[in-house]
Each structure stands twice: as C-alpha cells, then as structure tokens.
Amino acid sequence: METPGNHILVIFGASGDLARRKLIPALYALHVNRLLPEKFAVLGIGRSAYDTGSFRNYMDESLEEFSDDFHDDQQFLEKLDYLSIDPSVEDSYPLLAQKLEEIREGHSIPENYIFYLATPPSLYDVIPGYLAKNGLTSEHDGTWKRVIVEKPFGLDLESAISLNRSLLKVLDEDQLYRIDHYLGKETVQNILVTRFSNGIYEPLWNRNYIDYVEITSAENIGVGNRGGYYDRSGALRDMLQNHLLQLVALVAMEPPSEISSHTIRNEMLKVFQSLRPIKKEMVQDYLVRGQYMESHVRGELQKAYRDEEGVPEESRTETFAALKLYIDNWRWGGVPFYIRTGKRLPTKVTEIVIHFRPSPHALFCSEDAGYNSENQLVIRIQPDEGILLKFGMKVQGAGYNVQNVNMDFHYRDLMNADIPEAYERLLLDCMQGDSTLYARGDAVEEAWRFVAPILERWEQDNKFPLYGYPCGTWGPEQADLLIEGERRTWRYPCKNLADDGTYCEL
Ligand SMILES: NC(=O)c1ccc[n+]([C@@H]2O[C@H](COP(=O)([O-])OP(=O)(O)OC[C@H]3O[C@@H](n4cnc5c(N)ncnc54)[C@H](OP(=O)(O)O)[C@@H]3O)[C@@H](O)[C@H]2O)c1
C-alpha cells in the first residue's frame, strides 16, 4: 500500500477520551505497519495545560493501556506535539498558524494539513470558520487541507443542514471527511466485496429471492458515565440514523460502475432517497422504542437507565429502538428491513441477516421432526467477524428429516487476520485523500430526513409508548410483535451461555 503524502495532523480535543482511546492508538498502529508518511507530525490542541513533554507522557500511558504491542516507542512519541489554546476563541488561531509553521520548518513538511475535530459538536462549525479566516484551509501550490468531523453530525435534519451549510461556506465538499466509524470496519467493507466480487449472490439479491433483511446492533453494556450525553441523544440518533442506515445502504445499493468515492457514495445516496417515508401519524406501526429497567443478569444487579449517573429520573430517552422500513425501488419493492439496536441486551453483536424465501413447496415437511430449511446469510460485523450460511441437510437415517446446518467462515481463520481498527483505516484513507468510507453531506441529510418524522412525533406526543425491558433481554416484546405479526422472527444470535459467562453462537 502506498504511504500518504507528508503532512501534519492537528487533533482538536487531543486531551479527550477519543484521542487517547482511539486516535493515538490508531496512529501508532499505522506507524508500526509503516503506513505513516516519512515526514509526519501530530499536533494536539486543547485548553488543558499540557506542554509537548507532558502530552507525550500522557499518550505514552494511554498507549500502554490501549495498544496491545506498545513499549515506550520514542520514535513514535517524538512525532507528537501539543499546543494549549482555546479553539473556541478566534485569537488562538494566529498562535496555531505560528506553531504549524515551526513544525513544518523543523521537519521540512509541506503545507498539508488534516484537522481532526474531536471536540464537543458545538465547535464543529466554529473551528473550520476560524481556520479559514486565518488562511489555514486554503489549498495552493499543490498543497491540501482536509477536515475530519466526528459524530454526531447534527441532532436533527435542521441542525445537519445548517452544519453542512456552515462547513461548505469555508471548505469544499472534497475537503470534508464526516466520520461514521462503522464504515471503517473491515467487515462492513466486506459487504461490498461479498456482493460484488462473487457471481453467486447478486442474482439472488432482490425481492424475488429475499424475504426480509434483519440488522441487529446490540450492546450488553449500559450508558456508563456518558449518561448526560446519551440522554440528549438516544438510540435513534446515536446508532440508528447513522450506523444502521449506512449498513442498510451497503446491503441495498446497486453495484457502482467502479470502486471510487463518487460512484459508491452516489449509489448509497440513492438508497436513502428511496426509503419509504414514514408518516408522523404512522410511526407506531413502524417503530418500537424501549428503555432498560433494573434486573439481575447472571446474578448481578444491573441498574435501570433512569438510575444511571447524569440521567434524569423521569427520562423518556430510548435505549432501544426497532424499526421496520421499506426501500421503494425495483430491487427491494415489498421487502421489509427490520433493524434494531439497544443497550443492556444479552450480548455485544452487530450482524446483518439476509433471510431468503423458503423453497416453493415444502417437500420434506413432516409432523414429527422435519421442516423446510431456513436459508439465511449472516454477515457478522462484530465480534467474531465472518460470514455464515445456513441451509438444510438431511438428518442421517431413515426418512427425509431436514436439519439446519452452518457453513461458517471466521476472519480469524485467515492468515494474517489481524483486523485493523476502524480508525486506522479511516485515518489512512483521509491521509490518502480517499473519502469513500466517509459519509457525504447529501447522504447525511437524507438519512436525517428519513428519521425526522419519528423525532417530530416523539417531540409532539409525550404519550408515544416507551416500553421498559429488563437488562439482559432482547428489548421489549413489542419489538418481537413488530416482526412476528408478519410471520417472521428476529434471529437470536447468541442463545448459549459459554463457560466464561459470555453468550456464544448456537
Ligand atoms: N469517545 C468516543 O469513543 C467517541 C466515539 C464517537 C464519537 N465521539 C465524538 O468525538 C468528540 C470527542 O469525544 P471525546 O469523548 O473525546 O469528548 P471529550 O473527552 O468530552 O472532549 C474532547 C476534548 O474537547 C475539549 N473541549 C471540551 N469542551 C470544550 C469547549 N467548550 N471548548 C473547547 N474545547 C473543549 C476538551 O479538551 P480541553 O479541556 O483540553 O480543551 C476535551 O478533552 C465528541 O464530539 C464525541 O461525540 C467520541
């Protein structure tokens, strides 16, 4: 793989959680794999009173904690610099410009910059505005400037449109990299390869052969110490509007004419534009929301969402959402997509299940044991990344009883199956100027447009049901009814309890 052009990466919010847990470890992994440019520096920005020495010590400790194979690598730590300024104040930017010039001169780095916004979202339009005002975003004499914007990109349709407008006033779309870290996951990209590099799936990948599609993204943890943040967001904004709809787009899109940022993102946009709008008055027919309640899970008492730190006692924020949607186009007409996400569910898993239609005639159906096989293609995004095909086989012995069996591929069985973290791939792509795995502004707005009536209905109707569900269960039973009412069922990915107390594949 080609190494990217020489540049400086400026991280705003470098003293924060994301930088120490994800960004710096991802950069370290790129360094170990020799994927960083020859001339490269990281400039951390924050109000916290670090200097370069103490920032390096802090990152040294963070790398010990969050990188498997880090051992006091001075060669990497020497790439880190720090400037203590307040990025919300205009006067800080001449200091930033001066510091960048010093680093460039010291390391002979051209005027190529990536600005990573890992600050609270309220600064996502402020910082690029000040950068532009101080000439730090203008591309001249072959230099480039890119801005990575963290999630959340807006809190609703209006705020997303307004943020896009502010950013596009000072930057071109191709300078903008909107993170959806799901797109950086190896197995998510593999959806494209599975679909479009194999001749066997695509002929079946349509309404004629697929009965329904199911996407589950479950977490077994609660909101932890992020209750205050989460309560303003909820499952719909935090997971469904962005990550799960991106997965829907990858499953449902048409083949692009070539693998490029433009063509792939065009096809993804078309999926969002084809989502059947859910009318505000009809939301209850398409969506179930829930909130976790206190209960014992494997002998341990887990508290209710409303008892979490930073969460109001009367909170009506959803920690679970299940949604039925349709894509009104020729490929998917009439095929429901059921998507669900939640916290404090039985396990941590993200998977896509393609449920194929049953065979037209149940030849092997018998009263005692036999039944028609369930053909499912399960794309496991995390953990235990892989692909599983379920189909029927004859049970040995007399008669024709059918049993479902698995053809199971695990990424971990591949040679060199060291799956890179999403942030490694995304940072490297941005360094190389490839925005394929970043969300485009028009697509983000379309996804918000789709969920807007749901948010409006919740806002206007405080009696819209919010069902409680005990921690450690698959959400409220109304979510089962949403799908079972149509003679379909959720796949329960992990029903067995392994010896170590975690759930495992049946
Ligand atoms: N943490 C994650 O795993 C994660 C995952 C996905 C997305 N994100 C997104 O990434 C962004 C950063 O997340 P984080 O968890 O690192 O957040 P964080 O720890 O709360 O904040 C990051 C840094 O921003 C600076 N900051 C906070 N308030 C500020 C203000 N009013 N003015 C100027 N600077 C301010 C702080 O640095 P100083 O006090 O030193 O200035 C802080 O260290 C957030 O928007 C979040 O939504 C985070």
Image (cartoon, rainbow, N blue to C red):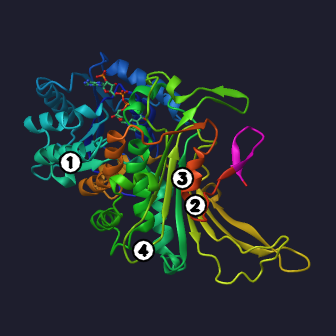
Whole-angstrom CA distance, mark 4 to mark 1, is 29 Å
User: Where 405 falls versus 116 (above or below)?
Assistant: below
Dot 2: element: loop
Whole-angstrom CA distance, mark 3 to mark 2, is 18 Å
Q: Nearer the viewer, mark 4 or mark 1?
A: 4
Amino acid type of the residue that numbered disc 2 sits on in the rendered structure: Gly
Q: Which residue has dot 1 on it? A: 161
Whole-angstrom CA distance, mark 4 to mark 2, is 19 Å
Disc 2: residue Cβ within 8 A of ligand 1's nearest atom:
no
Dot 1: element: helix
Q: Which residue has dot 3 on it? A: 216
**Residue 485: mark in rendering:** 2
Query: Could you say which is closer to the camera, residue 291 or residue 192?
Result: 291
Q: Is residue 219 magenta?
A: no
Q: Earlier in the sequence, mark 3 or mark 1?
A: 1
Q: Which residue has dot 4 on it? A: 333
User: Where 154 falls versus 434 (above or below)?
Assistant: above
The answer to whether the residues at label 1 and label 2 have Cβ atoms under 8 Å apart is no
Amino acid type of the residue that numbered disc 3 sits on in the rendered structure: Thr
Residue 221, position as x, y percentages in the image: 56, 35
The answer to whether the residues at label 3 and label 1 have Cβ atoms under 8 Å apart is no
Whole-angstrom CA distance, mark 3 to mark 4, is 22 Å
Q: Is residue 235 left or right of residue 472?
A: left
Quadrant, the C terminus: bottom right
Amino acid type of the residue that numbered disc 1 sits on in the rendered structure: Ile
| Magenta stretch, residue numbers | 495-505
